[in-house]
Amino acid sequence: MTGRNRVKVGMIFDIKRFAVHDGPGIRTTVFLKGCPLRCLWCHNPEGISRRPQLVFTPQRCIGCGRCLDLCPQGVHSFVDNRHLIEWERCLGCGICVEECYSEALRIAGREVSVEEVMDEVLSDRPFYETSGGGMTLSGGEPLAQPRFALALLQAAKGEGIHTALDTSGFAPWEHLEELLPYTDLVLYDLKHMDDGRHMALTGVSNGQILENLRRLDGVGKRIWVRIPLVPGYNDEDSNYHALGRFLSDLKNVEKIQILTYHKLAESKYESIGQRYPLKGLEPPAKEWAESRKRILLDYGLSQTVIE
Ligand code: SF4
Ligand code: SF4
């Protein structure tokens, strides 16, 4: 690849330091903004749109009214002492955010250069060295910004830092393949084995996702498969048996993580003016998660863990 093709600026919505659930050791996770999937249980709804978005935390609002005066779109209003937001009118320009001193308003999404990201990533190098950690690209979907993802991974490897890519696998194989020389570990999501159910739950087919995982395994890349366990949506026996059959054919899956559903994302939806599709859904019982794990163990997948 030539330097001309390399994108040095991308859109992110967060950088999380001291992350311990995004690969081995202590890591810095960079969340790239934009995702082609629409998973009903998405835990990062502010990462779906590629554009910057207003985020409002009502508990922090002191009712000063500055945002009403500043917004050129007339998005903010107060009715009966309640701060109302007309989300569909908001352009995400950030003008109101600058004068909200209580930080009730913020923008999720900013353009950053590779150098800016790497400055943050490198500041925790000693922690990576002592814990076996490194940098993880997550999202959103990192493969939705393939040039920027490539530039970040190249920069990290150039500094000798361990790299992980957290992906849905929904992208052309060529995009994934191009990142592999600079990726030590792939964290690969599997949401449902039945194509129709996958389409209903995520908005896209699983055909390309399964094919990419087979190819990834075929080239010998280190893989951790991650399976969200969402009660009533993808936890049925038939799905776990299909997962067991599929995964037991692969050779390079070091770990299978069953990620139990939790409700922490609910308030995130409200804060960006969206309705949470799974409102009221309770996390699975521990015994139920164990029973899902046992199905995979019966296929010889002893690397399965619940997290
Ligand atoms: S500027 Fe911030 S604190 Fe003031 S009314 Fe607007 S959201 Fe509330
Ligand atoms: S981000 Fe811009 S358009 Fe949206 S509410 Fe604030 S000032 Fe108005």
Image: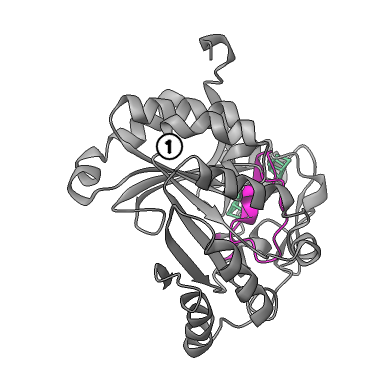
Name the residue at 62% across, 75% down: 241
Tell me the SS state at disc 1: loop
Q: Which residues are magenta?
A: 35-60
Q: Horizontal and vertical percent for residue 82?
A: 71, 66
- Residue that badge 1 annotates: 183
**x and y percentages locating residue 285 in the rendered image:** 52, 88
Q: Height in image: 239 above or below 129?
A: below
* Viewport quadrant of the C terminus: bottom left
Q: Is residue 218 above or below residue 152?
A: below
Farthest-out residue, front: 249
Residue 36 belongs to magenta span: yes
Residue 145 appears in the rendering: no
Which amino acid lies under the numbered mark 1 shown in the image of this protein?
Thr
Is 233 on the left-hand or right-hand side of 62? Answer: right
The one nearer the camera, 228 or 212, is 212
Tell me what residue is drawn at x 68 percent, y 56 percent: 272
Residue 72 part of the magenta-drawn span = no
Crowding at label 1, few (<14), some or many (≥20) Cα neighbours within 10 Å? many
The residue positioned 39% from the left and 59% from the top of the image is: 21
Going by the image, does 89 lie left or right of 131? right
> Is ligand 2 within 8 Å of the beta carbon of the residue shown at mark 1?
no
| Left or right of 87 on screen, residue 124 | left
What sort of colour scheme is used for the picture?
one colour
